[in-house]
């Protein structure tokens, strides 16, 4: 059976035991509620007693079930639908009784876990949505090349896509400066109605200007996680805002930019290590500062074991894994690494032709989709905004 538990690619400063507790209780959880259930707030509170963290979503995708918890843990397990008549009568009766207690009728088919050796997907479970190219941050390494004159994407023209998103999946909203988009709150309300877990990335430079807006978005439960792109680790006023925003803030750092002086800002917090993107302004900076950037990447590799002990959680994007190689640096076994690893952006198909990737990138200002934000121009594909999300996922697989 393939099973993993992660939000991105996660290494946590806590024992693996807690995640295994999540996993063992997952089976109880499967028994209690049907897999096509859309969770109501009261049900999440009831489950909190069992697993220690509220459930944000649970669904079937391709050949596996998915459970996402509020602390960012995700569990996947392969399985298939089976006629209930094949189940043992005792378990069938017990499940029917429990479902009746939850005011849900037993369905004709039940989900049964099995021992398939890989995952495949009918729709994306995580997707990055760039909603604007406008930003006044002026970061020298910006791979999106965002500027003060960048244009906003037409979000309302994409409503059909957003309405096709599946409950429990995750959207990472960014830019540019996503907070400056006039239709951001409209989009977040649509995602909330769909049951999509919305996360947003903001530049640290914008924390003070948009403090009240961010606090309101969190209070209204329109955003779950907030990624703060680190730019000034010495700014104590920004650090206070980070603390105000709550436990679901993740500090985003870039390999090759992050350095020793930045450690106090991430100490005791969750962080995401992004690989250095040799694209657009990032390419120009690399040309002029190649030795410094490479030296900082090497320093981060060597310091990672110590950094792991100083932070609450460390996660990586695929490029970060490629550049830092945490499996080797942290001496993880194959089983430990595979348990945490969510898959490559470029592992597109399995041997039977099923889609084997769970993520995608949507560029709304330019109305293109791709496997990832660093995809070359020939692997970015135009769309109209009238498609559903499964069609867009298939579109991103062309040419791979």
Image (spheres, helix red, strand yellow):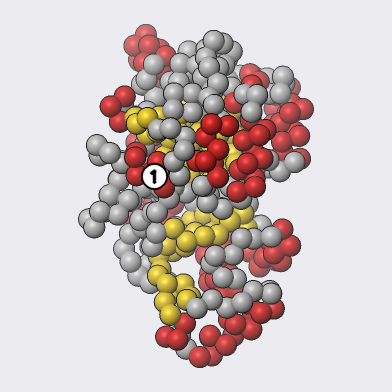
**Which residue lies at the image location 46% right of the left edge and 38% below the top edge?**
386
Write down the quadrant of residue 115 in the picture: bottom left
Q: Residues within 10 Å of mark 1 (few under 14, many from 20)?
A: few
Write down the quadrant of residue 394 in the picture: top left
The answer to which of 5 and 296 lies nearer the viewer is 5
Indicate the quadrant containing the C terminus: top left, top right, bottom left or bottom right.
top left
Write down the quadrant of residue 55 in the picture: bottom right
Q: Position of residue 5 (x, y in %)?
A: 48, 56
Q: Position of residue 280 (x, y in %)?
A: 39, 16
Q: Position of residue 152 (x, y in %)?
A: 55, 21
**Which residue lies at the image location 36% right of the left edge and 57% below the top edge?**
119
Q: Is residue 167 visible?
A: yes
Where 188 falls versus 367 (above or below)? Answer: below
The answer to which of 160 and 13 lies nearer the viewer is 160
Where 26 falls versus 241 (above or below)? Answer: below
Q: Which residue is mark 1?
A: 391
**Which residue lies at the image location 53% right of the left edge and 31% below the top edge?**
157
Instruction: Find the residue positioned furthest to the left.
Output: 351
The answer to which of 81 and 264 lies nearer the viewer is 81
Q: Is residue 28 visible?
A: no
Figure disc tally: 1
**Which residue lies at the image location 52% right of the left edge and 14% below the top edge?**
150
Local secondary structure at mark 1: helix
In this image, 165 relative to 289: left or right?
A: right
Q: Position of residue 224 (x, y in %)?
A: 64, 43
In this image, 228 relative to 280: left or right?
A: right
Where 164 falls versus 206 (above or below)? Answer: below
Where 318 falls versus 232 (above or below)? Answer: below
């Amino acid at each position: 059976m393939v099973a993993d538990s992660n939000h991105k690619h996660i290494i946590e400063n806590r024992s693996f035991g807690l995640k295994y507790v999540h996993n063992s209780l997952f089976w109880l959880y499967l028994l209690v509620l049907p897999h096509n259930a859309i969770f109501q707030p009261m049900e999440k509170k009831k489950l909190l007693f069992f697993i220690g963290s509220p459930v944000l979503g649970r669904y079937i995708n391709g050949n596996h079930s998915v459970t996402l918890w509020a602390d960012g843990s995700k569990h996947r397990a392969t399985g298939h639908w089976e006629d209930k008549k094949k189940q043992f009568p005792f378990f069938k009766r017990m499940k029917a009784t429990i479902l009746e207690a939850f005011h849900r009728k037993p369905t004709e088919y039940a989900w049964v876990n099995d021992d398939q050796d890989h995952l495949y997907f009918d729709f994306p479970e995580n997707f990055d949505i760039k909603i604007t190219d406008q930003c006044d941050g002026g970061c020298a390494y910006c791979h999106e090349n965002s500027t003060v004159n960048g244009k906003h994407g037409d979000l309302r023209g994409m409503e059909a896509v957003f309405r096709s998103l599946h409950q429990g999946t995750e959207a990472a909203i960014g830019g540019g400066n996503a907070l400056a988009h006039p239709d951001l709150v409209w989009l977040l309300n649509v995602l909330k109605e769909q049951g999509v877990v919305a996360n947003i990335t903001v530049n640290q430079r914008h924390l003070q200007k948009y403090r009240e807006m961010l606090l309101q978005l969190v209070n209204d439960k329109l955003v779950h996680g907030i990624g703060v792109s680190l730019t000034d680790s010495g700014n104590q006023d920004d650090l206070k805002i980070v603390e105000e925003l709550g436990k679901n803030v993740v500090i985003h750092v870039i390999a090759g930019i992050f350095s020793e002086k930045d450690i106090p800002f991430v100490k005791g917090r969750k962080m995401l290590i992004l690989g250095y993107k040799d694209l657009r302004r990032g390419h120009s900076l690399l040309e002029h500062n190649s030795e410094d950037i490479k030296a900082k990447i090497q320093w981060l590799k060597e310091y990672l074991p110590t950094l792991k002990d100083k932070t609450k959680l460390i996660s990586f994007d695929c490029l970060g894994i490629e550049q830092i190689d945490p499996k080797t640096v942290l001496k993880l076994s194959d089983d430990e690494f595979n348990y945490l690893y969510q898959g490559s952006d470029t592992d597109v198909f399995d041997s039977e032709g099923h889609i084997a990737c769970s993520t995608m990138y949507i560029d709304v200002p330019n109305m293109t989709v791709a496997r990832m934000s660093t995809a070359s121009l020939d692997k970015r594909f135009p769309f109209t905004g009238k498609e559903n999300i499964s069609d867009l996922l298939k579109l991103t697989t062309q040419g791979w």
